[in-house]
Amino acid sequence: MTTTSDATLPVLGAALTLDHLPGLLDWVMEHDRDLELQDFVDVALLTGDTSPTVARYRDLLAGHKGRIGIHGPFWDLPIAASDPDIRAVVQSRFLQALDGGEALGATHMVIHSPFTNWSHHNMPADRDGRSRIIDCAHKTLAPVVARAEAIGCTLVIENIEDREPDDRIALARSFDSDQVRVSLDTGHAHYAHVSTGGRPVDYHVRAAGSLLAHVHVQDVDGYADRHWAPGDGTIRWAPVFREIAKSCENPRLILELLDPNDIPRGAQHLVDLGVAI
């Protein structure tokens, strides 16, 4: 249980699959930590029978009171494709994932931003570049947003290759829906800051403000997308968490690590810094 002394600190959650949840279940249940279930990125699962996966999660998480979400499929699934046939495939996969999410009671689904470092440099030279990306994303996501609204699941748009946060924030706002908000991956942002000259991680938090609903917490060295435990890379965590406390209310703070067995160690690093529990 949370004590009086740490009641104001945010509670860390985790991104896990069925393979790793049992080994971390005690850690999850200790503080009813938010979860992001990542099995639903697998197209083989989405096009098959998801009910055994859902049933197993329900059994494992009986009595869990934290928030549950899923990571949506993303491999080869651009949300701003101009080809209507490709858009149809993307829509189908996202809707299949939301079906699984609904069965689990999921209240968030991560989808990936369409903006890249290339688009950052080239959109200013193309008068219609930004609006075209946003228009294509709307054509792809219209039925997905409608479904998310119907089941109370928030789509959170995660920075992937984004150099700056503003385009993704504008995209989220353009839907004018409470069920479309922004996700921040700390490692992706720090990579973009070090390797491409983007803004530092805490600036991403400030830019999104109350629109920030979800954070993938992972550490990197600025050269690649490492998904290391906090403390293993070069992100300055105290300023990031100070900005989270000032800028947004109760975002899901999801440790998304290359090795899920490192989650307790990474969480402890942040606990020792006094920024989370």
Image (cartoon, helix red, strand yellow):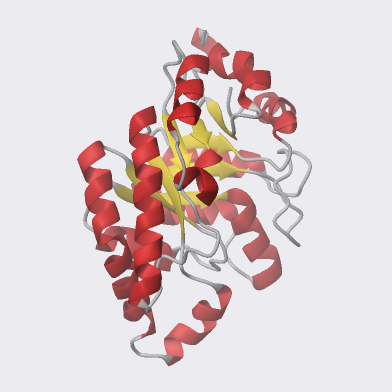
Seen in the picture, residue 53 relative to 164 is either above or below; the reply is above
Q: Is residue 195 left or right of residue 128?
A: right
> Could you tell me residue 115's position as x and y percent?
48, 70
Seen in the picture, residue 230 relative to 226 is either above or below; the reply is above
Say which of 202 and 37 sits in front: 37
The answer to whether residue 88 shows anywhere in this view is yes
Q: Is residue 43 left or right of residue 148?
A: right
State the residue at coordinates (45%, 15%). Answer: 64
Q: How many marks?
A: 0
> Could you tell me residue 65's position as x and y percent?
42, 16
> Could you tell me residue 241's position as x and y percent?
55, 38
Q: Quadrant of residue 69?
A: top left
Seen in the picture, residue 167 relative to 70 is either above or below; the reply is below
State the residue at coordinates (35%, 90%). Answer: 127
Seen in the picture, residue 61 relative to 135 is either above or below; the reply is above
> Could you tell me residue 82's position as x and y percent?
37, 78
Q: Quadrant of residue 154?
A: top left
State the residue at coordinates (66%, 30%). Answer: 270
Say which of 60 and 224 sits in front: 60
The answer to whether residue 248 shows anywhere in this view is no
**Image quarter in which the C terminus is found:** top right
Q: Is residue 213 left or right of residue 235?
A: left
